[in-house]
Image: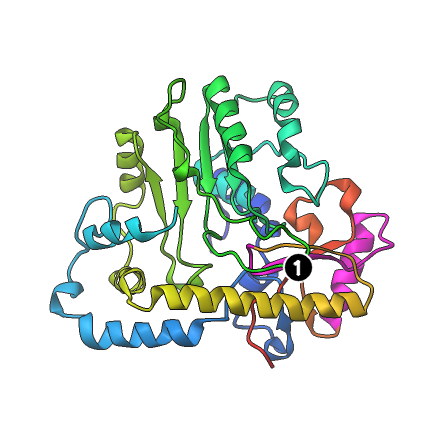
């Protein structure tokens, strides 16, 4: 029985599998799975009932025999692409290696309470890299710190990329959701990279790209739909289309289009933000009761908390994470979120879960 993999396949499995969340690897066969409170996965459970109602309407009223054929549009469903105009404009390394054989170079964050503090490290990281740098990729809002970048900070990234002749890729999968968060400026809102004037003199708009998906904001993690918006790079657009030649399944396409066209979209977005604010207030109130340090956030379904204040090694952090799982609570260790070595003991904890 041939059970050996090719060298490339073996390298992928050995390098990538340790970074795949345990929830994904073991879902479906863990004997006591229902007894685990899983706060490790960055999902939004707060508006699933409302989204489900839209889905039922889509399936009942809009799905027809034409939708059973091949998807229309080489670059994606044309109606969905038009609908995307209504948008207010963890763990990349594993998928970079697996999908594109790209090796990421991490830029350190000197201060966790200031997600944009990495800007001071960009030049040194670029100069010290042992391989060619082709792009700067941001998670905007930041994952796992759950904060938005200001317009000035994004413009600094854009200027850096233009000076180095590299691409700027903004992953905005958690945008444009923002909620009220005590302790953070009320005007700290989401700014999309697409709102910057990349056509201004001295800038190259063909090097600016945005990635978005309804999976986080609209609670559609299981639908597996995403898009890349590149406004001045036709060859890159065509390359993306070829990489996903068969397009997305029709049901996620119809549902996402219906959500973006829904007359209740504004109400749904407000409800989503309010429920995030309520859940965030609940979990942070417990942190305060337990004297557990946490990093305030306002743009994510999770928050960073220091669950092991006395951790002096990654092993100390892992021991506390395991102790929590032993009593039925699963969180995502800070090490798995690429936190720097000075920040041992933190964990990413999802709060956008069903109450009860």
Residue 288, percent from left and from top: 78, 66
66 to 315, vertically: above or below:
below
Residue 351, percent from left and from top: 61, 66
83 displayed left or right of 265: left
Q: Is residue 300 magenta?
A: yes
- The local secondary structure at tag 1 comes to loop
Instruction: Name which residue lies at 38% across and 58% down.
Output: 224
Disc 1 packing (10 Å; few <14; some 14–19; many ≥20): few
The residue indicated by pointer 1 is 182
128 to 258, vertically: above or below:
above
Looking at the rendered image, the quarter that the C terminus falls into is: bottom right
> What colouring does the structure picture have?
rainbow
Q: Residue furthest left?
A: 66
Q: Nearer the viewer, residue 291 or 41?
A: 291
Residue 253, percent from left and from top: 27, 59
Q: Is residue 204 magenta?
A: no
Residue 324 image-quadrant placement: bottom right
Residue 216, percent from left and from top: 47, 59
Instruction: Name which residue lies at 62% across and 34% down.
Output: 106
Please provide the residue range marked out in magenta.
299-326
Instruction: Name which residue lies at 35% across and 64% down.
Output: 265
């Amino acid at each position: 029985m041939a059970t050996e993999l090719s060298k490339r396949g073996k390298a992928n499995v050995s390098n990538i599998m340790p970074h795949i969340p345990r929830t994904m690897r073991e879902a479906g066969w863990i004997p006591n799975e229902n007894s685990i409170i899983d706060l490790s996965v960055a999902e939004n459970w707060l508006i699933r009932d409302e989204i489900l109602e839209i889905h039922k309407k889509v399936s009942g009223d809009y799905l027809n025999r034409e939708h059973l054929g091949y998807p229309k549009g080489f670059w994606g469903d044309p109606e969905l692409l038009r609908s995307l105009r209504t948008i207010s404009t963890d763990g990349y390394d594993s998928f970079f290696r697996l999908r594109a054989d790209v090796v990421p170079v991490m830029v350190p964050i000197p201060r966790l309470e200031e997600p944009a503090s990495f800007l001071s490290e960009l030049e040194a990281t670029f100069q010290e890299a042992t391989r060619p740098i082709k792009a700067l990729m941001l998670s905007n809002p930041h994952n796992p710190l759950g904060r938005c970048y200001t317009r000035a900070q994004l413009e600094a990234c854009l200027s850096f990329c233009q000076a180095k002749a590299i691409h700027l890729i903004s992953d905005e999968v958690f945008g444009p959701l923002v909620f009220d968060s005590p302790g953070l400026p009320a005007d700290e809102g989401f700014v999309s990279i697409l709102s910057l004037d990349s056509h201004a003199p001295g800038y190259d708009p063909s090097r600016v790209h945005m990635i978005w998906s309804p999976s986080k904001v609209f609670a559609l993690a299981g639908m597996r739909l995403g898009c890349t918006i590149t406004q001045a790079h036709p060859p890159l657009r065509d390359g993306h289309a070829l990489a996903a030649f068969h397009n997305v399944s029709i049901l996620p396409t119809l549902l996402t289009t219906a959500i973006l066209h829904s007359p209740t979209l504004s109400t749904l977005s407000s409800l989503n933000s309010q429920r995030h604010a309520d859940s965030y207030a609940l979990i942070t109130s417990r942190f305060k009761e337990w004297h557990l340090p946490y990093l305030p956030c306002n743009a994510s379904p999770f928050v960073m908390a220091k669950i092991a204040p006395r951790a002096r090694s990654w092993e100390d952090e892992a021991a506390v994470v395991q102790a929590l799982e032993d009593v039925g609570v699963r969180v995502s260790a800070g090490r798995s979120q690429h936190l720097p070595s000075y920040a041992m003991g933190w964990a990413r904890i999802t709060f956008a879960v069903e109450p009860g």
